[in-house]
């Protein structure tokens, strides 16, 4: 029986347009159940798709700080999240459930 070769899936490779990025963030917000680190990780996926260096520059953060904030291992401050969302060209909105 031949062995099946597998490769690691990276969602950032599939986020090509601003609309895809916005849809991914929207789905993440719906599925997060209050898990801020999960949302930060999704923002990291979007930032990698756009280019971490440019996102860091636009957010006024160092690349290292951006990587740490969006690693999913910690919860970044809301101020940092707002800077990153703006740098990604996205906006947050609210609606009634």
Image (cartoon, rainbow, N blue to C red):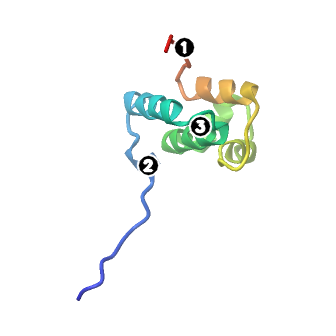
> Residue at 57% of width from left, 34% of height from top?
33
Alpha-carbon span between mark 1 and mark 3: 16 Å
Residue sitting farthest toward the bottom: 1
SS at badge 2: helix
Quarter-of-image position of residue 84: top right
Q: N-terminal of the two: label 2 or label 3?
A: 2
In which quadrant is the N terminus drawn? bottom left
In the image, 25 versus 29, the foreground residue is: 29
In the image, 58 versus 22, the foreground residue is: 22
Q: N-terminal of the two: label 1 or label 3?
A: 3
- Pointer 2 with pointer 1, Cβ within 8 A: no
* Residue to which mark 3 is pinned: 39
Where residue 87 appears, as percent x and y from the top left, is 60, 27
**Residue 91 drawn above or below residue 9:** above
How many C-alpha atoms fall within 10 Å of the one at disc 2: few (<14), some, or many (≥20)?
Answer: few
* Residue to which mark 2 is pinned: 11
**Residue 2 drawn above or below residue 72:** below
Where residue 51 appears, as percent x and y from the top left, is 54, 42
Mark number displayed over residue 73: none
Alpha-carbon span between mark 2 and mark 1: 25 Å
Where residue 91 appears, as percent x and y from the top left, is 54, 19
How many C-alpha atoms fall within 10 Å of the one at disc 3: few (<14), some, or many (≥20)?
Answer: many
SS at badge 1: loop
* Residue to which mark 1 is pinned: 94
- Judge left or right: residue 63 versus residue 8: right
In the image, 34 versus 61, the foreground residue is: 34
Alpha-carbon span between mark 2 and mark 3: 14 Å
């Amino acid at each position: 029986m031949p062995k099946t070769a597998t490769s690691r899936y990276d969602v950032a490779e599939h986020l090509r347009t601003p609309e895809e990025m916005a849809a991914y963030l929207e789905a993440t917000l719906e599925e997060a159940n209050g898990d801020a680190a999960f949302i930060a990780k999704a923002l990291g996926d979007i930032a990698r798709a756009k280019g971490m260096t440019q996102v860091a520059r636009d957010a006024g953060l160092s690349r290292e700080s951006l990587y740490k904030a969006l690693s999913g291992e910690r919860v970044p401050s809301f101020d940092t999240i707002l800077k990153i969302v703006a740098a990604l060209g996205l906006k947050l909105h609210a609606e009634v459930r």
